[in-house]
Image (spheres, helix red, strand yellow):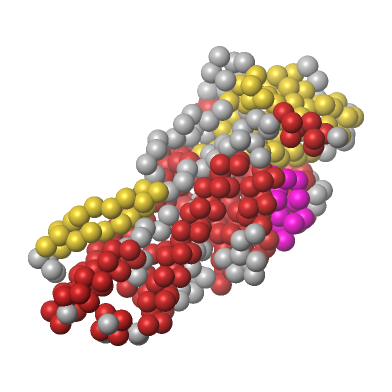
Amino acid sequence: MVTRICSGLPGRIVLATLVLCLGGCATYSQQATSMRDNLLVGRADLARQTAEKEDQNENDVLACLNKGMLRRMTDDYVGSNQIFEIAKQRMESLYGVSITRSAASVAINDAVREYKGDQYEQVLLHAYMAMNYLQLGELDSARVEMLQADVKMMEWGEQPDEDPFVRYFAGMIYEALGEPDQALVSYRKAHAVYNATRNEQNLDVPLMLKKDLLRLLAEQGLTDEYTTMKSEFGLANFSPAEPGDDFGELIIILNNGLAPIRTETSIMTFSSEVQGHVRVAFPVYETEPNPARKARLNVSGKLVDLETVENIDSLARQALDEDMPLVMARAIARAVVKYQSQKKVNEQDALAGFLLTVTNLATERADTRSWTTLPQEIQMARVMLPAGEHDVSIEIVNAAGRVIDAVEARVDIEPMQHRFLTRHWIAPVPLNNYIATKK
């Protein structure tokens, strides 16, 4: 009977492969849910334990991305970049699409395609590797990641495919390295891309970026452009601060919340090829984004609101919207192939046709994979501080302005230097775990 069911297919091996594919998809979904459940109660350590058990051979891009993010959440910046580098190299190799895998996605489902990440995920990988290097004090290595991100974005061609935060972030790294000309180029590009992607990210040009752009224009004596930009930004009263040689800058980057998670839905749609309705499954973001928590910096008696510089929630939804025509085309093509195979087998043996129908329904699964440990958004603040050690508190506030949690750190500010501090916040850490980690 199995042989008859597999008429026109490569036999029993294909059925076994289908079962393994379905099992793999279910395992990933369970793993992703388990990771997020732990993160949503402030237990990045437990989420990491779950992730580290998967993909021991480090062949899967998505597993490597999640491990890398969870390692940096638990302050393992070296280990994070080690696994991120594996993911990066694997992504590069997947630019050459496998014909076999592509054909299988039409015959089985999209989840059998090797995961190479959406464009926003690919470029953010470089940003997070740079953040890790900054935490390790390796500015030159962070610069290399920004150059690689630049090459990747230029490969995509059109300006709206660039990431404005990555452009802005690159400018900050160039400034920290004492390269103001390069920093100014990056700030100009960031300004242009924020404007170009306003609808995709639901973000205006950050006020911080406007001030940074004006500051560098003034420093380099570009008076005409400075005057034009000052008028365009509506900052007539702005004048660049001159804090003095005994001050340094603290740059706070907060990864706030969690990116949305894809789920599966299905519909019946008419196909002219079979002159009837077929069932297709496709990924969706069912829930609307929740407002991200607001944050502010409390340091040396100053309260500075953090500003949103990247809306990853919107980027994820936009990427799926752009992919949907191809996703639906593949899904309909699959449904037609499966319908025709069912019809042919059913004409030979009703029971075999029934079993093949069940198999086809079971294998029609949407590809719900995405980098689910990314934040919902990235927030940032820049503040000048006197040289020396400072206690820093990133305060998470509710709609009423009350502090509901805080991320504490101690930083050493050096004269005329830039100090980067990158942190994640998803949920308050349970009190007993917080006390244990402080012992």
Q: Is residue 165 above or below residue 407?
A: below
What percent of the width, then of the height, locates residue 319? 42, 51
Most common secondary structure along the magenta stretch = helix
Q: Is residue 143 above or below residue 97?
A: above
What percent of the width, then of the height, locates residue 140? 78, 55
Q: Residue furthest left?
A: 275
The quadrant the C terminus occupies is: top right
Asked whether residue 143 is in view, the answer is no
Q: Is 250 positioned to the left or the right of 427 in the image?
A: right
Magenta stretch holds residue 74: yes
Number of marks in picture: 0
Q: Nearer the viewer, residue 326 or 25?
A: 25
Q: Is residue 194 above or below residue 98?
A: above
Q: Residue 252's image quarter?
A: top right
Which residue shows up at 71% across the image and 55% down it?
80
Q: Residue 222's image quarter?
A: top right
Which residue shows up at 15% across the image and 60% down it?
277
Q: Is residue 228 above or below residue 355?
A: above
Which residue shows up at 61% across the image and 41% down it?
39
Asked whether residue 176 is in view, the answer is yes
The quadrant the N terminus occupies is: bottom left
Q: Is 172 positioned to the left or the right of 201 in the image?
A: right
Q: Nearer the viewer, residue 249 or 228?
A: 249
What percent of the width, then of the height, locates residue 313? 48, 41
Magenta range:
70-82
What percent of the width, then of the height, locates residue 26? 46, 58
Magenta stretch holds residue 429: no
Which residue shows up at 46% across the image and 46% down it?
261
